[in-house]
Image (spheres, rainbow, N blue to C red):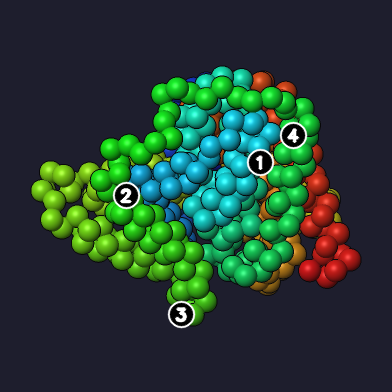
Amino acid sequence: MTGIIIAIFIIGYLAIAFEHSLRINKAATAMVTGVLCWTVYILFTENKEVVTGQLSAHLGNLSQILFFLLGAMTIVELIDVHDGFEIITRRIRTNNKRKLLWIIAFVSFFLSAVLDNLTTAIVMVSLVRKIVADTKDRLLLAGLIVVAANAGGAWSPIGDVTTTMLWIGKQITAYNIIFKLIVPSLVCLLIPLMILHFITKGEFQRRTAYQDTETTLTSRSKDRSIVFFSGITLLLLVPVFKTLTHLPPFMGIIAGLGIMWIITEFIHSEKDEEDRKKFSVAYALKKIDTSSILFFLGILLAVSALESTGQLHHAADWMDKNIKDQSLIAGSIGLLSSVVDNVPLVAATQGMYSLSDFPTDHYFWEFLAYTTGTGGSILIIGSAAGVAAMGIEKINFFWYLKKIGWLALLGYIGGAVLYILQHRLLGL
């Protein structure tokens, strides 16, 4: 039985990794893989009630992640449909390539911590397309955005799906992950950014179609500001809500979405029904990436099947006996995340090690958050942010590997070394 489940998981994993070659959406593959794993498990087990009980227990934990993502993505889409991100984009006026590199990098880094790396990549790459005319300049900036967004998402409990998973799973707490990882994550960005600074010169050609003057959006600039600042504030308050109430994070995000719903209904109450429709939560729900949520559901179901059958614990025992060092284990998983999606990797690691092995805020969990969050930048297919940028700008796999991949690797190593040193020398 276990051999069949592992085979199904590996085949599904390969299909996800080669999604673009097979032209099959990874969400579809993940869902089929997850259901097949549990189907084989229950068919080969005499006590069906035990299996269904295990599935129900896992589904309770998985639903927290899915509802959190659903709420967060809807709030972000509400900001987007109100053109809230224009507040950021219209303040970028420089034509100097070096200055633009630093501006784009830092905006992406901190924006990713508040939103998430995928949304940030989409917003920032789209912004660059509006401003920069030359394709080569845009590709370089898009590559930098991927590195910055992944680095920025690693140190925030809401900045990356994997960090959110560790937060919801009680492996990390919001305060500690910010305090321990913000500097290593910043180093992960600064190393490639400084190298690009010295090899980039001159000014970029601005798109003539992009104007710095006010547009027709002016008529609702007040609405835009209200929605933008309300949305960002509510996202930032989710960790505070969890700390004060001890309720799971998804409760905070659902409450935030409800408040955003009330705010948007109120500010558009005097508009016609047809005009209100495109600013509504219902419209935002249509725009969110539902396939990503279904992908997470499918892959987490598959991983939970491996955990329930004991395979992840066997893998943990093997790693403890053969690799032994916690830093090497976390570092290896991070490098693997450049090839394989980091969501199932983190889910598998959560199943491999319990909180009794590594308690909340343990060195291993925090380092894992860093490595899996930033390791995906090494290859363009290694993160959701990279795949999004690849789709928008049609970035070639080997171009990214040649121009950005090695820079991301240097940043990854630099941040990892700093984290290890700050733990061993300063006890952080």
**Disc number placed over residue 245 in the picture, else none:** 3
Whether residue 315 is visible, yes or no, is no
Q: Which badge, 3 or 4, is on the more N-terminal residue?
A: 4
In depth, the one of 178 and 193 nearer the eye is 193
Image location of residue 125, percent across then percent down: 51, 34
**Disc number placed over residue 197 in the picture, else none:** 4
Residues at badges 4 and 1 in contact (C-beta under 8 Å)? yes
In 3D space, how far apart are the residues under numbered discs 4 and 1 (Cα atoms)? 8 Å
Q: Which residue is most to the left?
A: 272
Q: Residues within 10 Å of mark 2 (few under 14, many from 20)?
A: some
Q: Which badge, 1 or 2, is on the more N-terminal residue?
A: 1
Q: Residues within 10 Å of mark 3 (few under 14, many from 20)?
A: few
In 3D space, how far apart are the residues under numbered discs 1 and 2 (Cα atoms)? 27 Å
Residues at badges 2 and 3 in contact (C-beta under 8 Å)? no
The residue pinned by badge 1 equals 102
Whether residue 116 is visible, yes or no, is yes
Q: Helix or strand or loop: what does disc 4 sit on?
A: helix
| Residue depicted at x 57% and y 45% | 108
Q: Is the C terminus in the top left, top right, bottom left or bottom right quadrant? A: bottom right
Nearer the observer: mark 2 or 3; the answer is 2
Give the amino acid type for the residue marked by disc 2 in the picture. Ser
In 3D space, how far apart are the residues under numbered discs 2 and 3 (Cα atoms)? 35 Å
